[in-house]
Image (spheres, helix red, strand yellow):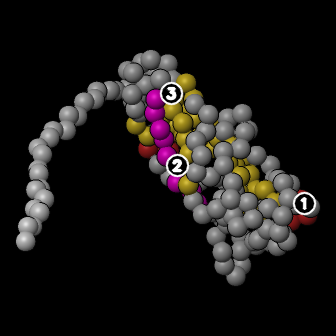
Amino acid sequence: MLLAASGVQAHDGRVYVSGTITDNTCSLSPDSENINVAMGAVSQRQFYRAGDGSAWQPFAIDLQNCGSTASGVTVSFSGAGDSRNTDLLALTAGESDASGIGIALYDQNKTLIPLGQESDVVTLSPGQASAHLQFYARYLADGGTVTPGDANASATFILAYE
């Protein structure tokens, strides 16, 4: 009886890692670490159908100490998405909270930034020491029945540099 034995071979290899350390980011200005946007009181009658919105409320993210090779930055927002329109930020849920609306976030040109997607690139000039990134928030009807109540939410923003 002959038995065939298969040999197990081991090979050694290497991983080569290469890259460059750059100076292309900025620091977040202390006043931009926690941003409060006052939406004000808005009548539920302002929201007749999906897509009806409230007034634009401006807010900004300020950057400082930008690196010498910083050329651009994008911003994305993350948070709980509205159940009827996942591009919108969901309101906190509770007994006294409003429903039928979400919060839409927009760039400086008032173009919607869907949750989880990056904004258009904001160009930074080489050696630019600081930058003011302008955004807007507003309530937007999501197609559900709008009921009055507290209309609060929170999101996290993420900066990505080029």
Q: Quadrant of the N terminus?
A: bottom left
Q: Can residue 133 be spotted in the picture? A: yes
Looking at the image, residue 82 sits to the left or right of residue 62; the answer is right
- On residue 89, the disc is none
- The location of residue 160, given as percent across then percent down, is 47, 38
- The location of residue 29, given as percent across then percent down, is 45, 39
Q: Residues within 10 Å of mark 2 (few under 14, many from 20)?
A: some
Q: CA distance from mark 1 to mark 3?
A: 37 Å
Residue at 43% of width from left, 25% of height from top?
70
Look at label 3 and name its amino acid.
Gly
The stretch in magenta equals 154-162
Look at label 2 and name its amino acid.
Phe
Which residue is identified by label 3?
72
Which residue is identified by label 1?
49
Q: CA distance from mark 2 to mark 3?
A: 16 Å
Q: CA distance from mark 2 to mark 1?
A: 29 Å
Q: Can residue 130 be spotted in the picture? A: no
Residue 157 sits inside the magenta stretch = yes
Q: Earlier in the sequence, mark 1 or mark 3?
A: 1
Check contact, mark 1 vs mark 3: CB within 8 A. Answer: no
> Depth check: 43 or 6 in front?
6
